[in-house]
């Protein structure tokens, strides 16, 4: 198995605001006009976008939310836990990884408007995944969680929020 550094170099990944490394690999040539999108979008969006994303221990993907559904796809490395927090405060966990006999899945869907954060399940490991979105990703639709605000809104999840925010 290749190292995390190999993948960062080979794929040309760069640091991401939420943690980890990424590179956009696809953006559709066609766009959806703002007038045909829900009001939460403040401009046109590509039909579809895709990225490579790599998380290396001890880093984590900090809680953030997006305006579009996002699908995570497992490629290689170790399993990771994706934590999904609904607007109503319901918390769920999806384990993305290579071994379905251990409760891991190859794909996970995070609904639009839900907070998500992720961490590796094993120390000294990494996970290389892909993320796809439709309508496509735009940084205008990206919101990084503020620890104090999210903890105030969902005090029952304080420990996890503190672990997965900066």
Image (tube, rainbow, N blue to C red):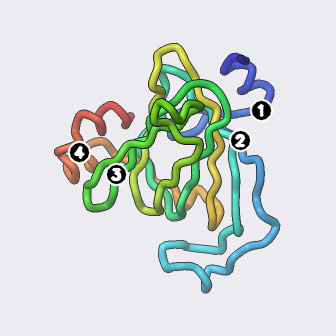
- Residue mark closest to the camera, 2 vs 3: 3
90 sits to left or right of 35: left
Residue contact between numbered discs 3 and 4, judged by CB atoms under 8 Å: no
Label 1: which residue? 12
Confirm or deny contact between disc 1 and disc 2 (CB under 8 A): yes
> Quadrant of the image for the N terminus?
top right
**Residue 151 numbered mark, or none:** 4
User: Residue beneath label 3, please?
Assistant: 85
Mark 2 to mark 3 CA distance (whole Å): 25 Å
Sequence order check, earlier mark of 1 and 3: 1
Picture quadrant of residue 99? top right
Q: Which residue is mark 2?
A: 23
Precedes in sequence: disc 3 or disc 4: 3
When the figure is inspected, residue 102 is found, relative to residue 62, above or below; the finding is above
Q: Position of residue 26 (x, y in %)?
A: 77, 53
User: Quick check: 40 above or below 88?
Assistant: below
How many residues crowd around disc 2 within 10 Å: few (fewer than 14), some, or many (20 or more)?
some
Vertical placement of residue 137 versus 130, above or below: below
The residues bearing labels 1 and 2 have C-alpha atoms spaced at a distance of 7 Å
Q: Residues within 10 Å of mark 4 (few under 14, many from 20)?
A: some
Which residue shows up at 70% across the image and 63% down it?
48
Which secondary structure, mark 4? helix
Alpha carbon distance from label 3 to label 4: 12 Å
Q: Is tag 1's residue or tag 2's residue first in the polypeptide sequence?
A: 1
């Amino acid at each position: 198995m290749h190292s995390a550094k190999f993948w960062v170099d080979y794929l040309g990944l760069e640091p991401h605001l939420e943690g980890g490394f990424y590179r956009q690999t696809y953006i559709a040539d066609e766009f959806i006009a703002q007038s045909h999108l829900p009001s939460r979008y403040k401009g046109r969006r590509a039909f579809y976008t895709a990225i490579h994303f790599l998380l290396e221990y001890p880093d984590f993907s900090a809680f953030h939310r997006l305006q579009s559904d996002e699908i995570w796809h497992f490629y290689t490395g170790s399993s990771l836990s994706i934590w999904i927090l609904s607007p109503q405060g319901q918390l769920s966990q999806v384990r993305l990884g290579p071994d379905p006999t251990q409760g891991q899945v190859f794909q996970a869907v995070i609904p639009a408007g839900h907070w998500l954060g992720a961490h590796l399940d094993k120390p000294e490991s990494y996970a290389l995944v892909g993320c796809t979105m439709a309508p496509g990703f735009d940084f205008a639709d990206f919101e990084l969680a503020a620890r104090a605000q999210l903890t105030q809104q969902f005090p029952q999840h304080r420990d996890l929020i503190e672990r997965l925010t900066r």
